[in-house]
Amino acid sequence: MKKSTLAIICIVIILSILLFYRVTLLQVYVADKGQQFNDILLQAPIKSGEKFSVKWIHSVSLRPVIETYKVENDLNISIYEMIFDSFSANLPSSPDYNTIWEYNEDHIRVYNYDVIFDAVPIVIGKVVANHTLCVRDNVIPLRDIYKPGGFVKIRAVKKSLIKYIVEEAFF
């Protein structure tokens, strides 16, 4: 086999992989109505079954809250657990449905939720909340990628590897 034929075969194989191999991505996108509506602010590779967290400070209790989510096989996102150390407005106050509550020395862990999102909604705190997305070893303050007070959503999508590479390189 000639070297040129072998090179063409390798190029075809590489292009096929780039075009047809699909990666799962976690995306943060703008949910505010207006010019930036649906703009993708951040995307990161994630695997089905993998978890990510949103950490924030509660505006009333001024205490930390950690919400952990799991990317499901169908790309929906389920609540995996919530951890907090103080009861306050808009936080769970007692078990409901099938949730399980663990009372630890320094926090309360609520899990066994039956809540699924196609996209997780977040209003980025203006003053106190400091919403932070944690994916693997990456810690991203949401106010650094969009305006405080802005409305974003987090979803999981599948894209071709080449589309992901091009978007990351040029946008």
Image (cartoon, helix red, strand yellow):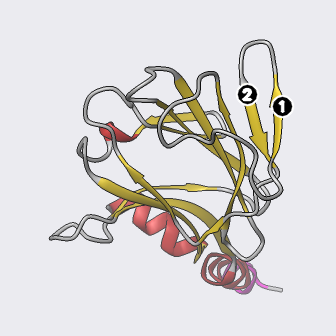
Q: Check disc 1 and report its element: helix, strand or loop.
A: strand
Disc 1 crowd rating (10 Å Cα; few below 14, some 14-19, many 20+) is: few
Amino acid type shown at disc 1: Glu
Q: CA–CA distance between discs 1 and 2?
A: 6 Å
Amino acid type shown at disc 2: Ile
**Where does the C terminus fall, quadrant-wise?**
bottom left
**Residue 149 placement (x, y as % from top left):** 25, 45
**Residue 93 placement (x, y as % from top left):** 64, 38
Kindly check if marks 1 and 2 are in contact, taking CB atoms under 8 A apart as contact.
Answer: yes
Q: Nearer the viewer, residue 96 or 54?
A: 96
Residue placed under numbered mark 1 in the picture: 102
Is 32 above or below relative to 18?
above
Residue placed under numbered mark 2 in the picture: 108
Q: Residue at coordinates 38% horizontally, 41% vertically from top-left?
A: 142
Q: Earlier in the sequence, mark 1 or mark 2?
A: 1
Magenta-drawn segment:
2-8
- On the question of residue 4 being in view, the answer is no
